[in-house]
Amino acid sequence: MTSYTELLARKAELDAQIAQAQAEAKAKAVTEARALIQEHGLTAADVFPPQGKKPKGTVGAPKYRDPATGATWTGRGKPPNWILGKEREQFQI
């Protein structure tokens, strides 16, 4: 029967072999990817397109306008005080 210390030693050897194989596979994949990128003239935007996030600061087009002040509201989120309790149709842009 194999002792605990022998098993730990074998585990350490296997972990080292796994790390070595993983490093080699990763290096090969990077080399192949770089060759394909250069061959096809790809850019970072081609390979990694945006994830559909909206640029900061964009909240949408305004749908309602306060005729007294000119303030606008998109219809999303908490309604402003000037439209609370009133018919929204009269403020539509």
Image: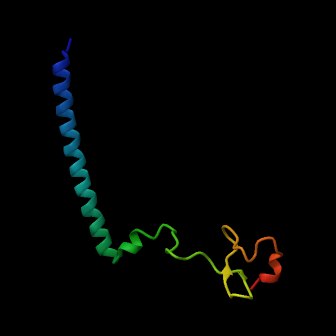
Residue 16 placement: quadrant: top left
Q: Quadrant of the C terminus?
A: bottom right
From the viewer's perspective, is 73 left or right of 58?
right
- Total tally of numbered discs in the picture: 0
x then y, percent, for residue 31: 24, 63
Residue 66 placement: quadrant: bottom right
Residue at 21% over, 36% down: 15
x then y, percent, for residue 68: 73, 88
Question: Front-most of 83 and 88?
Answer: 83
Vertical arrangement, residue 75 with respect to residue 13, above or below: below
Vertical arrangement, residue 80 with respect to residue 66, above or below: above
The colouring scheme, among rainbow, by chain, secondary structure or one colour, is rainbow
x then y, percent, for residue 34: 27, 68
Residue 30 placement: quadrant: bottom left
From the viewer's perspective, is 53 left or right of 73?
left
From the viewer's perspective, is 60 left or right of 57?
right
Question: Front-most of 64 and 54?
Answer: 64
Q: Quadrant of the N terminus?
A: top left
Residue at 18% over, 32% down: 12
From the viewer's perspective, is 35 left or right of 45?
left
Question: Front-most of 47 and 76?
Answer: 76
Vertical arrangement, residue 28 with respect to residue 83, above or below: above
x then y, percent, for residue 92: 77, 82
Vertical arrangement, residue 80 with respect to residue 71, above or below: above
Question: Front-most of 52 and 70?
Answer: 70
Residue at 29% over, 74% down: 38
